[in-house]
Amino acid sequence: MANEQIFVGLEIGTTKICVIVAEGRADGTISILGVGETPSRGVRKGEIVDLATVSDCVREALLDAEDKTNVEIANVWVAITGSHFRSFNNRGTFMLPEDRDEILEEDLQTVEINAKEVSLPAANSFLHTIIQSYHVDGNENVLSPVGMAGSRLEADFHIIHGVKTRIQNTLRCIESLKLGIEDVVMSSLASALVVLTQQQKDLGALVIDMGGGTTDYLVYLDGAIRHSGVLALGGDHITNDISIGLRLPIARAEILKIKEGSADDPDKSEGGIITLKNDPGFHGCEIDRKALNTVIHLRVREIFELIRNDIESSGEGMLGMLGAGVMITGGCARLRGIAQLAEEVFEIPVQLTRAKDVGGATQTFENPQFSTAIGLAKYAMAVSGNLPRESIIQKVAHRVGGLFRRKQR
Amino acid sequence: MSTVTTMRRVLVGVGNAGVSVLDRIAVASPGLKGLMVINNDAESLAASVVSTRIDFSNEAGEDLADGFLAIEEEYARAISGATSVILCGGLGGETGSFLLPALAARAKADGITTLASVGIPFSFEGRQKRELATTALEKLRALCDAVAVIDNDRLSGGVPSTAAIGEAFQEADKALQSSVLAIQGMLSTSGPVKITRTDLAAVLGSQGAITHFGHGRAAGDNRLHEALEASFRSPLLTIPGKGSALREASMVLLLLEGPSDLSFAEVQRAVSEMERMTGDRCQIKVGVHASAAPGAPLDISIIASSGTLRQPAVKKAGESLASAASTQPSPREPAAAPIPGEVKEVRHSKPVKQNPVKQTQGVLDLENYQRGRFDKSEPTIVNGDDLDIPTFLRKGIKLGTPRDTEKN
């Protein structure tokens, strides 16, 4: 355990529950030992609606992971999402006392507390308070102000908050399994951590994690998080639309979406007929490909447009500044034509992406569905931070270490 | 007919807050008579849409009491003949803090039932203002039959933290408006199920108790649930950190005002919903006022009181929840409201037989179908659109040949 640490990431998704067991290496990378996975039941739009069922599913996934990795899981890092999360940027200010001109570690905490002095809706509590940059006496973008001389310390934070009871539901589910919770992390944050390189964060990038029940997105610019959001829309909605539009049972619609669906502009695609075979309890039928693609295209385009409008309204021209473009991950990243559509909407380069800087079971990290869970392990690694010098992660960890506060409950 | 009833009730807005609240009310319900504003700011008076305006502009240094003497006669004339006066305004400012008690005293002296709905300033407006407000509030409580208090600070739970300061004050005005409307509505209940003045005084009257208001309005087929939900969510009905105030309420007044097709089933459902929200020992009193034109929105007003309560001096039999819910208008009621009652009563008893079930079910089904598997989950609403409904349906796009796909 001296150099190697085991981190377990648990994501309770709308489609699947997955447990990633990863090993933190001395060189700052993580290596995946194995993945436990079960289809998810009792989760809608990223949030638990049936506690008992979800508990069973989580237990199954944990056992699966323990079997595959031979690791006994005691503590987990948990990803959380839901439409109730909100975010905003705020600046905290702290004037140093007259008789002192050196900035101390505790001043950073004070300035963070000051930044959090905003009135949230009564039911909400803070999940993350993430530093963007410090300013000392008007000197912008100071990375580490401790030890510097100054009289006025300011700091910009990105603050994410959500409804306390709804966050607690996830925690309760995990506690009922007698597991320890290391920390709770916003899904989009975990995904971004693993799909973006430091360079991409500096250049600026929009990460869209489009899962089954929710679409989480997050904007990095100049190495800091500028904006984040959750839309309670995802792959399930596409399936549901197909089911309604083409009058198919949900399960059929899901298969059709995966096998044949495309988000590309239906006017450009070739069209044609898809024949669905007879099955017990299901009459075979013929589907117009154009109709199928129209349904998917309209829905995905709408989701992207909502994201675009939200980002534009939070900072005009922000999209144009994203040098690294848009990264799409999550289960829906596997949808055909999604990158082209995203490019049309955002008008900047788009990549489909997955976990990077990760070793171990290839199948796992090559699948964009696991981005969030792997991101948890990486987050855990960064926060735990007993790393040798010189690595990029170490730098992140150093910056990040003080910034991601443990969630207080 | 309705003018007769409303003319006898006078709504008085005092000070800047009072003027803006009354303006809102006047705009929202153009037909409402008996509105009056008093302010020391001639400009705000001139801009007001309320027809009866009294200018209380006193010269610098002049005693406020002298200023009041100057307008007292005009005020007395305006309220003469009224059965009740509802004063509303913000405490803490000079005008409100002085005038509200003075006006209350005069109305009371004329033998008019006097109620007041007042706002306590935000704490960021300064301690001095709050102190002034507290003193004035004590005076008002001693003078009025009932005083509803809205602590602006309690509103901040409902106002997003990033809200502009102007919005915070607007929110405060809205809250004051809904409380005034709730009180006014409860007083004017002339429908088959009534809330009495004693009940109102019991809910608002006692010292130390906190009063909570809720108001919701909705039209359409699911109007009852939507209006109920909106009223339950009102910021003034929540205690920061504790959730709904209804759970701890010891007495709740529930008023349904709406179109004549308001059904008995709807009333019953509203009451049972309310029972679910409140504790076992909570006393629920219901008022129904179903005289608006068919298709008009349904308004639900809630006044709840938590903490110690002064029981009404005379406990009325038959006003309890059980009887209210089961009321076929009791034989006692028509006598209580002879003129407006006769029409409404008939309307009220008619739907009992036919309407309730048929109406709500048909529409819900359609909606469920559109929402598919999300039918029971929390809707994803962005910019007012229910995004669970397929995009192509909302955009009205026809799919190539959807029907041809079903080939055996």
Image (cartoon, coloured by chain):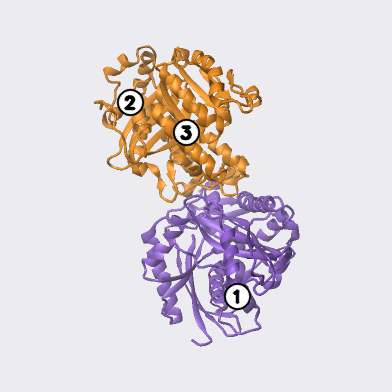
Chain colours: A purple, B orange
Nearer the observer, disc 2 or disc 1?
2
| Placement of the C terminus of chain A among the 4 image quadrants | bottom left
List x then y, in percent, for residue B325.
30, 30
Front residue of A154 and A77: A154
Q: Is the residue under label 1 in contact with that under label 3 (CB below 8 Å)?
A: no
Residue hosting label 1: A397
**Amino acid at dot 1:** Ala
* Category of crowding for the residue at label 2, using alpha-carbon neighbours closer than 10 angstroms: few (below 14), some (14–19), many (at least 20): some
- Residue A116 vertical placement versus A366 (above, below): above
> In this orientation, which residue lies closer to the viewer: A93 or B381?
A93
Instruction: Name which quarter of the figure residue A323 lies in.
Output: bottom right
For the residues marked 2 and 3, what is the alpha-carbon distance in whole angstroms?
Answer: 24 Å
Element marked by disc 3: helix
Q: Which residue is mark 3?
A: B136
Residue contact at pointers 2 and 1, CB within 8 angstroms: no
Identity of the amino acid at label 2? Thr
Tell me residue A184's x, y (percent): 49, 66
Residue type marked 3: Ala
The residue most toward the left is B317
Q: Is residue B384 above or below residue B294?
A: below
Pointers 2 and 3 in contact (C-beta within 8 Å): no
- On screen, residue A164 versus residue A291, left or right, reads left
User: Do tags 2 and 1 sit on the same chain?
Assistant: no
What residue is pinned by disc 2? Answer: B198
| Residue A242 shows in the view | yes
Residue depicted at 53% across the width and 42% down the height:
B128
Please give the chain letter of the residue carrying mark 1: A
For label 3, the crowd category at 10 Å Cα-Cα, with few meaning under 14, some 14 to 19 and many 20 or more, is some
Chain assignment, label 2: B
Residue at mark 2 shares a chain with residue at mark 3:
yes
Q: Earlier in the sequence, mark 2 or mark 3?
A: 3
